[in-house]
Amino acid sequence: MKKGKLIVISGASGVGKGTVLGIMMEKRKDLTFSVSATTRPPRPGEVDGVHYSFVTKERFEEMIAQGEFLEYDAHADNYYGTPRAQAEEKLEHGCVLLDIEPKGAMQVRQAMPEAVLIFIMPPSMEELERRLRGRGDTPEDQIQKRMQRAVWEMEQRSWYDYVVVNDDAQRCADEILYILAHEAN
Ligand code: 5GP
């Protein structure tokens, strides 16, 4: 029996989704995070099984063939996907947060229309680029690709249920928690 809802959080790379999600999970211990599978290599500090399940391209394609993903997408030269079994298991205990991009969010909306879709905007494009560079872990060609993709991603916000601005991570987390209190209890 599902006890919670899927909460999809999207927003351009560098918008601060990780920080916002971290604050939300500190404040609401009943929220869990869906750990995506990806073929991208871990960044410094990222832990396998916590931030992502890091898998090979062959393994990812095997999982696609077995129908193991609730949604998946290929972007920034890598595959990213939400393992269905894990999400369903976590939903039995409460709401589950998904940090995924718009193509995946659209697949979730079709598979689970009751999911709540939230889009996080940066205060400005200049600020987004500054944050992306400030992380210091993304090569220049990737920064340019991610900025181009950010423009397309932000156009997708119109079909999300809610749009919030991450001008301050604490405030943004509180705003999303407020939404969840009304949507997902
Ligand atoms: P990053 O490489 O910076 O961790 O993530 C790049 C993008 O992939 C982000 O926009 C993130 O939301 C998205 N992403 C992470 N996991 C998934 C997933 O399981 N499915 C989809 N569709 N996108 C994901």
Image (tube, rainbow, N blue to C red):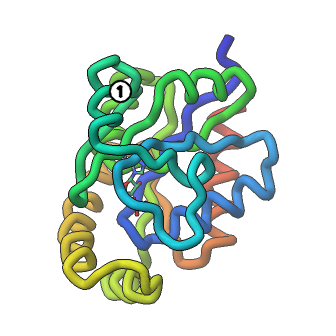
Amino acid on which the number 1 mark rests in the picture: Met
- In the displayed orientation, state which residue is furthest to the top: 1
| Quadrant in the rendering for residue 26 | bottom right
| Quadrant in the rendering for residue 176 | bottom right
Viewport quadrant of the N terminus: top right
Q: Nearer the viewer, residue 183 or 79?
A: 79
Q: Secondary structure at mark 1?
A: helix
Task: Please indicate whether residue 94 sits to the left or right of residue 166 in the image.
Answer: right
Above or below: residue 148 compared with residue 9: below
Residue at x 35%, y 56% (from the top left corner)? 40
| Quadrant in the rendering for residue 59 | top left
Label 1 CB sits under 8 Å from any ligand 1 atom:
no
Label 1 CA crowd tier, 10 Å (few <14, some 14–19, many 20+): some
Residue 151 place in picture, x, y as percent = 22, 67
Task: Please indicate whether residue 87 sits to the left or right of residue 147 in the image.
Answer: right
Residue 9 place in picture, x, y as percent = 49, 50
Residue 50 place in picture, x, y as percent = 62, 50
Residue at x 67%, y 61% (from the top left corner)? 22
In the picture of the structure, the residue carrying the numbered disc 1 is 63
Residue at x 55%, y 43% (from the top left corner)? 35
Viewport quadrant of the C terminus: top right
Q: Nearer the viewer, residue 40 or 131?
A: 40
Above or below: residue 5 compared with residue 24: above
Q: Give the tally of numbered discs.
A: 1
Residue 124 place in picture, x, y as percent = 36, 81
Residue at x 32%, y 31% (from the top left corner)? 107
Above or below: residue 142 compared with residue 25: below
